[in-house]
Amino acid sequence: MSVQVPKGNLPVVLLKEGSTENKGREAQKNNIAAAKIIAEIVHSSLGPRGMDKMLVDSLGDVTITNDGATILKEIDVQHPAAKMLVEISKTTDSEVGDGTTSAVILAGALLENAESLINQDVHPTVIVDGYRKAQKKALHFLKEIAEEVTANDKSILMKIAKTSMQTKLVKKESDHLAELIVKAVVSVAEKDTGAFTVDEDDVKVEKKAGGSMKDSLLVEGIVLDKEVVHGGMPKKITEAKIALINTALEIDKTEFDAKINISNPQQMKTFLDEENRMLKNMVDKVIGSGANVLLCQKGVDDMAQHYLARAGILTVRRVKESDMTKLAKATGARIVTNLDDLFEKDLGAANLVEERKIEEDRWVFVEGCKNPKAVTLLLRGGSQRVVDEVERSVHDALMVVKDVMENPSIVAGGGAPETFAATRLRNWAKSLEGREQLAVEKFADSLEAIPLTLSENAGMDPIDTLTNLRAKQLKGEKWTGVDVMKAKVGNMKSSEIIEPLAVKNQIVSAATEAACMILRIDDVIAVAKSAGPPGGDMGGMGGGMPGMGGMGGMGGMPGMGGMGDMGMDM
């Protein structure tokens, strides 16, 4: 069969049918609009007067939070440009813990201000160059305003933790929780060549609904959400000598099919006796080491449990690997893989190992370790929703305390550093030539979105607040910010609202990078999803009968999705 091609120009089709392409201004407009919507979602959650969001997932699980990263993670954003803002909130959360909402709001403001320049025919590349220069300069100004502090000054660390929790549900109990958090971080911090390093994983956070936030406590050791394996074992051991093993106290199964021919009951008894003897031999090695507590990563056979109970050894099995590592740091024990290598020097020590009932569950507490390099924060709350939000708040507070210990520089809260940097940037912009000057001025305006949003959420007049704030900053009052709790512009140092410099640096850097990346996009090509599995051409078949990959335009007979017109080229 021959196909005639008409003369003249043919349209060149590069993309699959159903694919879409947005170019130039339209693409930029769509991307900026999507990013602005994301910023708008979290906009009302910023600051101590910010509102919470209730998020309901497809399974009906409810999350109530005002944590920017959690909100954006739960709402499952689909737009590719909007996803970039979700990513910067996630990165900020894992890097510095706090400032996730601020980073998204700043990125949204940068894009909104860039859009007004694009509408004035300023090229996006010029805006990006101006933003990058402004970012570098803003970080310099933030360093200039920052104050050096002593890394392990507990009073400063307490203020930092409390500031982080002022915006959360837990602010009423922030004094109690801040004390626990600072104690936890200071105890696990390692000092190396004058500088502190903190691994936040060394602070284990366990949560249990019940009681109130006041009942939260710090355990100088590890809490295991496991119970003692055998009813005949002691439930409490003082002056514990702890063995950590990651091998099973069970008889290994053969790796290949094995058959044993047994011809009389005596042979059966001999076989079982040998198994018991092997298990008793394993337990004897534990007893021989002098251990009175055994924490095992793998399983413990019923017969081994009997022998351990008879020896009065408190045993817990199937302990998570991450908990084993923390137990080694907390108690000073060595994790042993081969029982032949278990000696007294490998044992850890704790003042008390005890099984306690927490609500409906029984948990084992290993506490009173002499110099614990891993500790547990046990968080309580009136309901599961409350305790989940307490955990998120404590994570942020742990991270900001860690930030200050590792990088001991602080700035004021309440939008003071942003306003300071914006004021200085405007002065510096005057020295620039060309259109980059406009971009730097817009960057300064964007920084002021933080104090503007704080004042809006507090019910203050945003314009009056901002003009008042600018005037005081110009007079050199660098610690002046929006005191949301008193609903006025005031000195943030006297209100003890302070934040780590590391958080502010992360917010400015992450927001600028995301905004610049979105601004540089001038073409969005979305390829259509594949209609079905690759293979033969099935003509009109594309949707319809369940279980058959769908059969296109079938209409007619009920019960079969109808088989009116199969549209198949045979």
Image (cartoon, grey):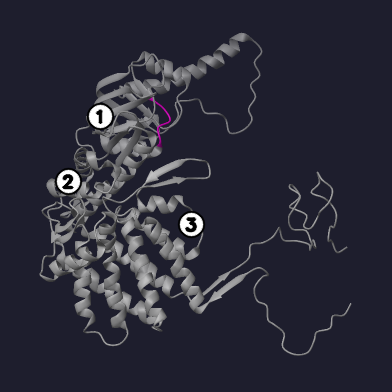
Say if 2 sits above or below 486 in the image: below
Query: Residue 150 vs residue 520: left or right?
Result: left
Residue at image position (30%, 45%) is: 393
* Residue under numbered circle 1: 367
Position of 323 with respect to 478 (left or right) is right
Q: Nearer the viewer, residue 494 or 358?
A: 494
User: Residue 485: percent from the left, percent from the top?
Assistant: 20, 50
Question: Which residue shows up at 35% across the image and 58% down it?
Answer: 43
Identify the image quadrant of the C terminus: bottom right
Name which residue type carries label 2: Met
Report if residue 7 is visible in the image. Answer: yes
Tag 3 near tag 1, CB within 8 Å = no
CA gap between label 3 and label 1 equals 43 Å
Q: What stretch is highlighted in magenta?
A: 316-320
> Considering depth in this image, is 370 or 536 the residue closer to the camera?
536
> Which element is circle 2 on?
helix
Task: Specify whether 14 is left or right of 159.
Answer: right
- Count neighbours of disc 1 (C-alpha within 10 A) and say few if under 14, some if 14 to 19, many if 20 or more: many
Residue under numbered circle 3: 77
Kindly state the secondary structure of the residue where label 3 is placed: loop
Placement of 23 over or under 375, stated as above or below:
below
Residue that appears at 31% across and 82% down:
436
- Residue placed under numbered mark 2 in the picture: 158
Query: Residue 523 in magenta?
Result: no
The disc, 1 or 2, on the residue closer to the chain's N-terminal end is 2
Q: Earlier in the sequence, mark 3 or mark 2?
A: 3
